[in-house]
Image: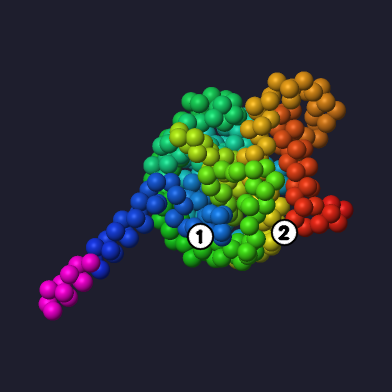
Amino acid sequence: MKKSIFFLAFFIFLTALILLSNGSQAFATGEAEIKKSAGRLNISVDPRIELLSVVRLLSGVSEKGHAAYDTVYKKAALDHFKKFKKHPAVELYKKMTTSGFSYDAPPSAMLHLSWPDLKVKIPFTDYLITRARGVENLNKMAELFADFAKKSDFEAFYKSNADFYGSLLDGAIKAIGKNDFAAQLESYFGPGPNSYNIILAPILRRQGGYGPSVKSPDGRLDVYNIMGPIGADEKNYDFGGTENYRSLVWHEFGHSFVNPLTEMNSAEVNLYKKLFDPIAKQMAEQAYPEWQTSVNEHIIRAVCARLSAINLGESELYE
Protein backbone atom coordinates (compact mmCIF):
# COMPACT_ATOMS: atom_id res chain seq x y z
CA MET A 1 0.00 0.00 0.00
CA LYS A 2 2.80 2.40 0.99
CA LYS A 3 4.62 1.57 -2.24
CA SER A 4 1.48 2.40 -4.29
CA ILE A 5 1.08 5.74 -2.49
CA PHE A 6 4.76 6.53 -3.11
CA PHE A 7 4.49 5.79 -6.85
CA LEU A 8 1.25 7.82 -7.10
CA ALA A 9 2.88 10.81 -5.39
CA PHE A 10 5.96 10.48 -7.60
CA PHE A 11 3.77 10.32 -10.73
CA ILE A 12 1.88 13.50 -9.71
CA PHE A 13 5.17 15.30 -9.00
CA LEU A 14 6.64 14.22 -12.35
CA THR A 15 3.50 15.30 -14.24
CA ALA A 16 3.55 18.72 -12.57
CA LEU A 17 7.23 19.12 -13.41
CA ILE A 18 6.61 18.31 -17.08
CA LEU A 19 3.69 20.74 -17.27
CA LEU A 20 5.76 23.51 -15.70
CA SER A 21 8.69 22.91 -18.04
CA ASN A 22 6.36 22.86 -21.04
CA GLY A 23 4.84 26.15 -19.95
CA SER A 24 8.20 27.88 -19.68
CA GLN A 25 9.36 26.37 -22.95
CA ALA A 26 6.29 27.74 -24.76
CA PHE A 27 7.28 31.22 -23.60
CA ALA A 28 10.93 30.69 -24.57
CA THR A 29 10.33 29.55 -28.13
CA GLY A 30 8.55 32.70 -29.27
CA GLU A 31 5.01 31.49 -28.77
CA ALA A 32 2.69 33.88 -26.95
CA GLU A 33 2.24 32.91 -23.33
CA ILE A 34 -1.29 34.31 -23.35
CA LYS A 35 -3.17 32.45 -26.06
CA LYS A 36 -6.37 30.55 -26.79
CA SER A 37 -8.00 28.99 -29.84
CA ALA A 38 -11.29 29.22 -31.68
CA GLY A 39 -11.48 26.30 -34.07
CA ARG A 40 -8.46 26.58 -36.36
CA LEU A 41 -7.71 30.16 -35.33
CA ASN A 42 -4.95 30.70 -32.77
CA ILE A 43 -5.67 33.91 -30.84
CA SER A 44 -3.02 35.59 -28.71
CA VAL A 45 -1.52 38.71 -27.24
CA ASP A 46 2.03 38.16 -28.44
CA PRO A 47 4.89 39.47 -26.23
CA ARG A 48 6.94 40.45 -29.28
CA ILE A 49 4.14 42.66 -30.60
CA GLU A 50 3.49 44.15 -27.16
CA LEU A 51 7.21 44.94 -26.85
CA LEU A 52 7.09 46.70 -30.22
CA SER A 53 3.96 48.55 -29.11
CA VAL A 54 5.71 49.83 -25.98
CA VAL A 55 8.75 51.05 -27.94
CA ARG A 56 6.45 52.71 -30.46
CA LEU A 57 4.51 54.37 -27.64
CA LEU A 58 7.70 55.76 -26.09
CA SER A 59 8.91 57.03 -29.47
CA GLY A 60 5.89 59.28 -29.88
CA VAL A 61 5.68 58.20 -33.53
CA SER A 62 2.37 56.90 -34.86
CA GLU A 63 1.01 56.43 -38.34
CA LYS A 64 -1.77 58.80 -39.40
CA GLY A 65 -4.92 58.09 -37.38
CA HIS A 66 -3.37 55.25 -35.38
CA ALA A 67 -2.28 56.77 -32.07
CA ALA A 68 -3.06 54.39 -29.19
CA TYR A 69 -6.29 55.01 -27.28
CA ASP A 70 -5.94 56.65 -23.87
CA THR A 71 -6.64 53.82 -21.44
CA VAL A 72 -5.55 52.46 -18.08
CA TYR A 73 -3.37 49.90 -19.89
CA LYS A 74 -1.63 52.58 -21.97
CA LYS A 75 -0.96 54.61 -18.81
CA ALA A 76 0.41 51.52 -17.05
CA ALA A 77 2.79 50.92 -19.95
CA LEU A 78 3.98 54.53 -19.95
CA ASP A 79 4.47 54.48 -16.17
CA HIS A 80 6.41 51.20 -16.21
CA PHE A 81 8.73 52.13 -19.10
CA LYS A 82 9.07 55.93 -18.76
CA LYS A 83 12.68 55.67 -17.59
CA PHE A 84 13.61 54.07 -20.93
CA LYS A 85 12.25 56.75 -23.25
CA LYS A 86 15.78 57.60 -24.40
CA HIS A 87 16.90 53.98 -24.81
CA PRO A 88 18.72 53.36 -28.13
CA ALA A 89 15.93 50.98 -29.21
CA VAL A 90 13.43 53.84 -29.06
CA GLU A 91 15.77 56.20 -30.92
CA LEU A 92 16.46 53.62 -33.66
CA TYR A 93 12.76 52.84 -34.05
CA LYS A 94 12.01 56.54 -34.44
CA LYS A 95 14.72 56.90 -37.09
CA MET A 96 13.65 53.80 -39.05
CA THR A 97 9.97 54.69 -38.94
CA THR A 98 10.54 58.15 -40.37
CA SER A 99 12.57 56.53 -43.18
CA GLY A 100 9.76 54.28 -44.41
CA PHE A 101 9.86 51.39 -41.93
CA SER A 102 6.26 51.87 -40.81
CA TYR A 103 2.75 50.36 -40.83
CA ASP A 104 3.06 46.59 -41.47
CA ALA A 105 6.87 46.41 -41.60
CA PRO A 106 7.79 46.62 -37.86
CA PRO A 107 5.26 44.01 -36.61
CA SER A 108 6.11 41.74 -39.54
CA ALA A 109 9.80 41.92 -38.62
CA MET A 110 9.07 41.05 -34.98
CA LEU A 111 7.52 37.74 -36.05
CA HIS A 112 10.91 36.67 -37.44
CA LEU A 113 12.42 36.87 -33.94
CA SER A 114 12.46 34.32 -31.12
CA TRP A 115 11.20 35.05 -27.63
CA PRO A 116 12.50 36.10 -25.15
CA ASP A 117 16.03 36.50 -26.56
CA LEU A 118 14.85 38.15 -29.82
CA LYS A 119 17.33 36.31 -32.02
CA VAL A 120 16.61 36.06 -35.75
CA LYS A 121 15.03 32.59 -36.00
CA ILE A 122 13.67 33.04 -39.55
CA PRO A 123 15.65 35.14 -42.07
CA PHE A 124 14.13 38.50 -42.95
CA THR A 125 12.45 38.71 -46.34
CA ASP A 126 13.66 40.93 -49.17
CA TYR A 127 10.53 43.02 -48.63
CA LEU A 128 11.45 43.76 -45.00
CA ILE A 129 15.10 44.39 -45.86
CA THR A 130 14.02 46.93 -48.48
CA ARG A 131 11.58 48.62 -46.09
CA ALA A 132 14.29 48.84 -43.40
CA ARG A 133 16.91 50.05 -45.88
CA GLY A 134 19.24 47.16 -45.18
CA VAL A 135 19.41 43.99 -43.13
CA GLU A 136 21.92 45.69 -40.83
CA ASN A 137 19.15 47.94 -39.53
CA LEU A 138 16.92 44.94 -38.83
CA ASN A 139 19.69 43.10 -36.98
CA LYS A 140 20.47 46.22 -34.96
CA MET A 141 16.78 46.62 -34.14
CA ALA A 142 16.60 43.04 -32.84
CA GLU A 143 19.74 43.56 -30.73
CA LEU A 144 18.52 46.84 -29.20
CA PHE A 145 14.99 45.55 -28.59
CA ALA A 146 16.47 42.59 -26.69
CA ASP A 147 18.51 44.98 -24.57
CA PHE A 148 15.44 47.15 -23.94
CA ALA A 149 13.35 44.14 -22.91
CA LYS A 150 16.01 42.92 -20.48
CA LYS A 151 16.82 46.25 -18.85
CA SER A 152 13.18 47.35 -18.53
CA ASP A 153 12.04 43.93 -17.25
CA PHE A 154 9.45 43.77 -20.02
CA GLU A 155 8.67 40.12 -19.25
CA ALA A 156 7.46 41.07 -15.76
CA PHE A 157 5.19 43.74 -17.22
CA TYR A 158 3.78 41.29 -19.76
CA LYS A 159 3.10 38.59 -17.19
CA SER A 160 1.53 41.07 -14.75
CA ASN A 161 -1.13 41.81 -17.36
CA ALA A 162 -2.05 38.16 -17.99
CA ASP A 163 -5.62 38.55 -16.72
CA PHE A 164 -6.19 41.62 -18.88
CA TYR A 165 -4.87 39.84 -21.98
CA GLY A 166 -7.02 36.82 -21.16
CA SER A 167 -10.14 39.00 -21.09
CA LEU A 168 -9.30 40.29 -24.58
CA LEU A 169 -8.99 36.73 -25.86
CA ASP A 170 -12.31 35.75 -24.26
CA GLY A 171 -13.97 38.62 -26.11
CA ALA A 172 -12.48 37.46 -29.40
CA ILE A 173 -13.63 33.87 -28.92
CA LYS A 174 -17.14 35.05 -28.08
CA ALA A 175 -17.26 37.24 -31.21
CA ILE A 176 -15.99 34.49 -33.52
CA GLY A 177 -18.38 31.91 -32.09
CA LYS A 178 -18.71 28.77 -34.21
CA ASN A 179 -17.82 30.50 -37.48
CA ASP A 180 -15.06 28.76 -39.44
CA PHE A 181 -13.58 31.70 -41.34
CA ALA A 182 -10.51 29.67 -42.36
CA ALA A 183 -12.69 27.06 -44.08
CA GLN A 184 -14.53 29.82 -45.95
CA LEU A 185 -11.22 31.12 -47.28
CA GLU A 186 -9.99 27.68 -48.29
CA SER A 187 -13.26 26.83 -50.03
CA TYR A 188 -12.54 29.78 -52.32
CA PHE A 189 -8.74 29.60 -52.73
CA GLY A 190 -7.94 25.95 -52.06
CA PRO A 191 -5.65 24.40 -49.39
CA GLY A 192 -4.30 26.93 -46.94
CA PRO A 193 -1.24 27.56 -44.75
CA ASN A 194 0.17 25.67 -41.78
CA SER A 195 -1.59 27.90 -39.23
CA TYR A 196 -3.92 30.89 -38.90
CA ASN A 197 -3.00 33.31 -36.10
CA ILE A 198 -4.85 36.35 -34.77
CA ILE A 199 -2.77 38.68 -32.59
CA LEU A 200 -4.69 41.28 -30.59
CA ALA A 201 -2.60 44.45 -30.25
CA PRO A 202 -4.32 46.95 -27.94
CA ILE A 203 -1.75 49.76 -28.18
CA LEU A 204 -0.09 49.13 -31.58
CA ARG A 205 -2.67 50.78 -33.80
CA ARG A 206 -6.35 51.59 -34.13
CA GLN A 207 -9.01 49.97 -36.30
CA GLY A 208 -7.85 47.49 -38.92
CA GLY A 209 -4.89 45.20 -39.06
CA TYR A 210 -1.82 43.85 -40.80
CA GLY A 211 -1.59 40.49 -42.55
CA PRO A 212 2.01 39.26 -42.52
CA SER A 213 3.05 35.69 -43.18
CA VAL A 214 6.19 33.87 -42.07
CA LYS A 215 7.69 30.92 -43.93
CA SER A 216 9.86 28.57 -41.87
CA PRO A 217 13.02 26.97 -43.32
CA ASP A 218 11.09 23.73 -43.94
CA GLY A 219 8.59 25.62 -46.11
CA ARG A 220 5.65 25.79 -43.70
CA LEU A 221 3.70 29.03 -43.90
CA ASP A 222 2.15 30.63 -40.82
CA VAL A 223 -0.18 33.56 -41.47
CA TYR A 224 -1.15 36.35 -39.11
CA ASN A 225 -3.81 38.99 -38.59
CA ILE A 226 -2.43 41.61 -36.21
CA MET A 227 -5.53 43.49 -35.05
CA GLY A 228 -5.95 46.89 -33.48
CA PRO A 229 -9.09 47.80 -31.49
CA ILE A 230 -11.94 49.69 -33.16
CA GLY A 231 -12.58 51.66 -29.98
CA ALA A 232 -11.88 51.91 -26.25
CA ASP A 233 -12.96 53.61 -23.06
CA GLU A 234 -10.77 54.13 -20.00
CA LYS A 235 -10.66 50.45 -19.00
CA ASN A 236 -11.96 48.41 -21.93
CA TYR A 237 -10.96 47.73 -25.52
CA ASP A 238 -13.41 46.95 -28.29
CA PHE A 239 -12.10 44.68 -31.04
CA GLY A 240 -15.50 44.47 -32.67
CA GLY A 241 -18.07 41.76 -33.12
CA THR A 242 -18.43 38.84 -35.50
CA GLU A 243 -18.53 41.00 -38.62
CA ASN A 244 -15.28 42.79 -37.77
CA TYR A 245 -13.44 39.51 -37.17
CA ARG A 246 -14.90 38.01 -40.34
CA SER A 247 -13.87 40.92 -42.57
CA LEU A 248 -10.38 41.17 -41.09
CA VAL A 249 -9.76 37.41 -41.25
CA TRP A 250 -10.87 37.30 -44.87
CA HIS A 251 -8.84 40.37 -45.77
CA GLU A 252 -5.61 39.85 -43.83
CA PHE A 253 -5.37 36.08 -44.26
CA GLY A 254 -6.41 36.53 -47.88
CA HIS A 255 -3.03 38.18 -48.45
CA SER A 256 -1.31 34.83 -47.82
CA PHE A 257 -3.09 33.46 -50.88
CA VAL A 258 -3.02 36.54 -53.14
CA ASN A 259 0.43 38.05 -52.52
CA PRO A 260 2.45 34.95 -53.56
CA LEU A 261 0.45 34.77 -56.81
CA THR A 262 1.12 38.38 -57.81
CA GLU A 263 4.78 37.97 -56.81
CA MET A 264 5.03 34.81 -58.91
CA ASN A 265 3.54 36.70 -61.85
CA SER A 266 5.20 40.05 -61.17
CA ALA A 267 6.45 40.44 -64.76
CA GLU A 268 2.89 40.30 -66.09
CA VAL A 269 1.56 42.48 -63.26
CA ASN A 270 4.18 45.13 -64.06
CA LEU A 271 3.06 45.31 -67.69
CA TYR A 272 0.19 47.45 -66.39
CA LYS A 273 2.25 49.59 -64.02
CA LYS A 274 1.22 52.82 -65.78
CA LEU A 275 -2.28 52.33 -64.40
CA PHE A 276 -0.85 53.25 -61.01
CA ASP A 277 -0.01 56.84 -61.98
CA PRO A 278 -3.57 58.27 -61.76
CA ILE A 279 -4.17 56.74 -58.31
CA ALA A 280 -0.65 56.90 -56.83
CA LYS A 281 -1.38 59.80 -54.47
CA GLN A 282 -4.57 58.27 -53.07
CA MET A 283 -2.91 54.87 -52.66
CA ALA A 284 0.14 56.31 -50.90
CA GLU A 285 -2.15 58.07 -48.41
CA GLN A 286 -3.57 54.64 -47.52
CA ALA A 287 -0.09 53.11 -47.06
CA TYR A 288 -0.01 51.45 -50.50
CA PRO A 289 2.87 53.34 -52.15
CA GLU A 290 3.77 50.74 -54.78
CA TRP A 291 1.99 49.24 -57.79
CA GLN A 292 2.18 45.60 -56.69
CA THR A 293 0.93 46.43 -53.19
CA SER A 294 -1.96 48.35 -54.72
CA VAL A 295 -2.79 45.43 -57.03
CA ASN A 296 -2.85 43.07 -54.05
CA GLU A 297 -5.25 45.34 -52.18
CA HIS A 298 -7.62 45.63 -55.13
CA ILE A 299 -7.66 41.86 -55.63
CA ILE A 300 -8.22 41.23 -51.91
CA ARG A 301 -11.17 43.60 -51.83
CA ALA A 302 -12.71 41.91 -54.87
CA VAL A 303 -12.24 38.50 -53.24
CA CYS A 304 -13.83 39.70 -49.99
CA ALA A 305 -16.82 40.91 -51.99
CA ARG A 306 -17.15 37.46 -53.56
CA LEU A 307 -16.79 35.76 -50.17
CA SER A 308 -19.58 37.98 -48.82
CA ALA A 309 -21.84 37.03 -51.71
CA ILE A 310 -21.07 33.32 -51.32
CA ASN A 311 -21.31 33.06 -47.54
CA LEU A 312 -23.73 35.84 -46.60
CA GLY A 313 -25.80 36.33 -49.75
CA GLU A 314 -25.64 38.57 -52.82
CA SER A 315 -27.53 41.31 -50.99
CA GLU A 316 -24.44 41.89 -48.80
CA LEU A 317 -22.63 43.32 -51.83
CA TYR A 318 -24.92 46.33 -51.75
CA GLU A 319 -24.95 46.98 -48.01
At 49% across and 46% down in the image, what residue appears?
Answer: 48
Q: Quadrant of residue 271?
A: top right
Q: Can residue 236 be seen in this view?
A: no
Along the line of sight, the residue nearer the viewer: 101 or 95: 101
* Residue segment shown in magenta: 1-11
Coloration of the structure image:
rainbow
Residue, far left: 2
Q: Could you tell me which quadrant the C terminus lies in?
A: bottom right
Circle 2: is it few (<14), some (14-19), or many (20+) Cα within 10 Å? few
Residue 59, compared with residue 135, is above or below; it is: below
119 sits to left or right of 133: left
- Asked if residue 4 is positioned above or below residue 184 in the image, the reply reads below
Quadrant hosting residue 264? top right
> Could you tell me which residue is drawn at 47 percent across and 62 percent down?
162
Question: Toward the viewer: 85 or 249?
Answer: 249
Magenta segment includes 8 = yes
Residue 39, by quadrant, is bottom right
Position in image of residue 54 (x %, y %):
53, 48
Residue placed furthest toward the bottom:
1
- Which residue is denoted by mark 2 in the rendering? 243
Report the quarter where the N terminus lies.
bottom left
Residue type at mark 1: give it.
Lys
Q: Which residue is drawn at 68% across and 37% down?
A: 258
Q: Which residue is drawn at 51% across and 63% down?
A: 166
Kind of residue at disc 2 = Glu
Instruction: Residue 221 in the image: state x and y as whole percent.
Output: 53, 40
- Residue beneath disc 1: 36
